[in-house]
Image (spheres, grey):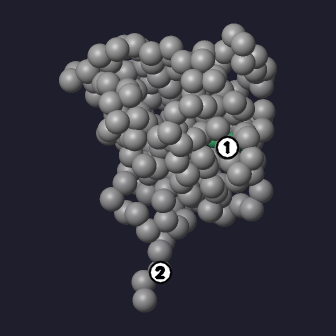
Amino acid sequence: MTTIKRLPPGQHPTSGFPTLHYGPIPGFNPATWDFRIWGAVEEPIVWTWDQILDLPRVKVNLDLHCVTTWSKFGTEWEGISPKMLVEQGVIKPSPEARFVMQHAEHGYTTNLPLSVFLQENFLIATHYNGQPLTPEHGYPLRGVTGSIPGQTDLKDVYLWKGAKWLRGLEFMARDQFGFWEANGYHNEGDVWMEQRT
Ligand SMILES: Nc1nc2c(c(=O)[nH]1)N[C@H]1C(S)=C(S)[C@@H](COP(=O)(O)O)O[C@H]1N2
Ligand SMILES: [Mo]
């Protein structure tokens, strides 16, 4: 029998769900809220909140790893999968697209290689553990990323690579730093290689 290794180096498990963000928690008005996809894509997209709710949905179980050293095992997320939307031709990255910037309320940003953004351990989530996101955890929509226990072929990155209060995606030919990446965090943030700063 093999034991699945779930705790990355330098992390400790937590049963709570700490919240961490820079700046205030934004409000949400479904009448004016929109979600934009632009940059290195064949067709830019602007979705309303209702259009987001009409997209195909998936559930994924993730172990979350925050760079401040807590890990939370077995969290259940529901929402839209960039991997699925690209496979279905709903989102069409251009051939030159290599990176994706998540843009959130109040200017928070975080960057990922397109290859990591299109893994099944990255979700644009509306629900956590069967309930709509709470305001402090990113309501109405957030990027979330972690590890899928036992699935060792995926790149696993720290939770700062999922933007809460997500408002848009910018596909890019060249990499650019997001908020924490520009403030000294590691650009890749691999949890197993302990790429914190
Ligand atoms: N918009 C926004 N998203 C953000 C952040 C932030 O400051 N603003 N912080 C990131 C960091 S550092 C972490 S660890 C996670 C925390 O998510 P949680 O508060 O749901 O635990 O959100 C990430 N997403
Ligand atoms: Mo974090």
Residue hosting label 2: 3
Q: Is residue 162 visible?
A: no
Q: Please report the residue visible at 40 percent of the width from the left and 35 percent of the height from the top.
A: 85
Image coords of residue 159 (percent x, y): 57, 43
* Image quarter where ligand 1 lies: top right
Q: Please report the residue visible at 38 percent of the width from the left and 26 percent of the height from the top.
A: 91
Compared with 59, 110 (above or below) is above
Q: Quadrant of residue 75?
A: bottom right
What secondary structure is marked by label 2? Answer: loop
Question: Closer to the camera, 71 or 162?
Answer: 162
Labelled disc at residue 127: 1
Q: Which residue is the extreme one toward the bottom?
A: 1
Q: Please report the residue visible at 48 percent of the width from the left and 59 percent of the height from the top.
A: 148
Q: Is residue 111 visible?
A: yes
Q: Is residue 141 left or right of residue 194?
A: right
Compared with 17, 114 (above or below) is above
Image coords of residue 2 (percent x, y): 42, 83
- Quarter holding the N terminus? bottom left
Question: Closer to the camera, 69 or 16?
Answer: 16
Q: Quadrant of residue 127?
A: top right
Labelled disc at residue 13: none
